[in-house]
Amino acid sequence: MPYCSSPWFHNRRLTREVTVGTLGMGGVVIGGGHPVVRQSMLTCDTMDTELCVQQTLELVAVGCELVRITAPTVKDAANLESIVRELRKQGCLVPIVADIHFKPDAAMEAVKWVEKVRVNPGNYADKKKFAVKEYGDAEYAEELRHVEDAFAPLVLEARRRNCALRIGTNHGSLSDRIMNRYGDTPLGMVESALEFARVCRRHDYHNFVFSMKSSNPKVMIECYRLLVSRLEAEGPDWNYPIHLGVTEAGEGEDGRIKSAIGIGSLLCDGLGDTIRVSLTEDSPREIAVCNDLLAQIPFLSATQPPPFTPSLLAWDPFTYKRRESAEASLGDVACGGEQTVRVVVTQDVFDKVTPRISPKADVKPEAILEDLNLLELDPTREISIESIPCETQLVTVQDGLRLPPITAFRLLAVRLARLGRRNPILLKDCFTWGPVPLSPEIALLRAAVTLGSLLADGIGDAILLRGESGAGQSLSLAFNILQAAGCRSFKTDYVACPSCGRTLFNLQTVTARIKARTEHLKGVKIAIMGCIVNGPGEMADADFGYVGGAPGKINLYVGKKPVKFNIPEAEAVDLLIDLIKEHHKWFEPEPATLSA
């Protein structure tokens, strides 16, 4: 089944409408062709009514349309009444979403006071202990009855109160039952969500949305595509709206790039009805990125079908696999084949950055555009096999083409596949650029969406970034996009949650402290998690984890295995470094290799 109406031009998926709150009284509609709804989450303690109200007002002031607040206990859920009452008293009508994990009783309390409740199927009715167990069909059916018993009361109360729900699965918190049958896979995430959706539908409740979040943009993209495909297969009345987000994206440029790849690529394909950009920063900054990202989609996706619209794709949209290509020389390095994805720069960028780069630097130009034996093609026209000298000929899309690069390079991949050619492809972030350069913020988002989307499709053997006018910035951005897309690892990778009322330490401060000590550890992945809700699961592919275990106490992990418990926070970073050294992942940093 297809995951969108067309991968060649933007045609937004038409969903049913989900109403959150009362229309005319601050309520919003998700889906049904309405504008994409922007949302964020509070970072403070839910029992601090005054601060919750203040943070909500700050979010609303910058354009947030839905505000989520965690409710980890019944006591927290009950205090939502005070928060909502004070907001309404101050004239703030923004719908409030309660975020629930582990506690059905907290959800039953929260539904009394808020306009929407988010539940995580991985921990709402099931327990997660990383237990290995074989489930027969009868045992599995019994577990599903348990899910029904746990979830149906909330569904009935939400229907009675006209409250919306979000069925939000997370890659890091699938239940043991799902893990044992489907593994830690996109299929497992989709099946977990569909189980809960079926409970809703059995009770004639349809005011809900889905989400499929992961800290890995490629996994997140695969999950949403598979979800939409499955919904289409279930039938036309399964057209529920979609909430997009890359969870634990981190901070700064890295967090924005990951979010742009995951959210932006799906928006370009017409998927997504509400978005949240999860950054380990103050929440209002998330809305600014939401606004900027949404504004770029018309520039990055075709509004009309191109002249050539293939009926079949040249890649599997549900399972990542890098496109097979022949190896070609770029001078001092090669691309294609088994080679890593390379970074190409213009002569101008090369001249500006090379005097400031150490020979040992990981971030450095690998080829100069003007020196390449490069064949430019127009994929909207028929390409003959005679026009391409050989399979080792590096090819790209010609400049000036009146198509967005995502569409153009997808078409090129199909043209080459039809010819049976495995020519390596040089990706470009843009085909034209104006006299006024883009701001760094916008250049970052456009490049990340364009290049990241294609790389997530498995297309591309080298990349050329020209939309960012700063030479050093463009070079760094190119490498950061490759790292975020999982194509290269040239620096430490961080999985950091965005903070909420469950967080047991100051995430921004601690993340900065850990980065200052570890950002030179090329190839090491470190997870920094405020609590255990998604911690062990989202850290499963991390080398080391720093997780809030209790107030003032930290647990340290190797992979998903906890190895040190209840460490005083003042000692935790030092002990994390010791743990990295014990596992022979530590080396001393070298001097900076590229100035700003």
Image (spheres, rainbow, N blue to C red):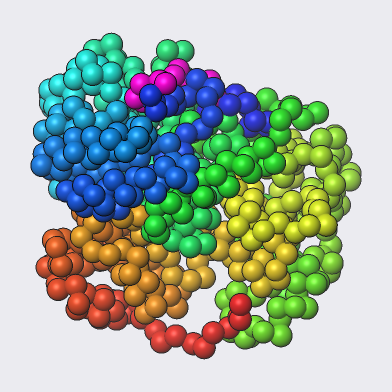
Q: Is residue 234 visible?
A: yes
Q: Residue 17 appears in which quarter of the rendering?
A: top left
Nearer to us in this view, 436 or 329? 436
Query: What secondary structure characterizes most of the magenta part?
Result: loop
Nearer to us in this view, 86 or 530? 86
Which residues fall within the magenta stretch? 13-24
Q: Residue placed at 64% from the left, 44% from the top?
A: 296
Q: Residue 520 appears in which quarter of the rendering?
A: bottom left
Indicate whether 233 appears above or below 171.
above
Indicate whether 576 appears above or below 207.
below
Which quadrant: the C terminus? Answer: bottom right
Tell me where residue 400 appears, x and y as whole percent. Answer: 85, 47
In the image, is 216 to the left or to the right of 70?
right
Indicate whether 429 appears above or below 177.
below
Nearer to us in this view, 386 or 406? 406
Tell me where residue 484 appears, x and y as whole percent. Answer: 51, 58
Q: Residue placed at 38% from the left, 24% from the top?
A: 25
Is 342 colored magenta in this rendering?
no
Indicate whether 333 appears above or below 408.
below
Tell me where residue 253 appears, x and y as whole percent. Answer: 52, 62
In the image, is 524 to the left or to the right of 590?
left
Is 23 colored magenta in this rendering?
yes
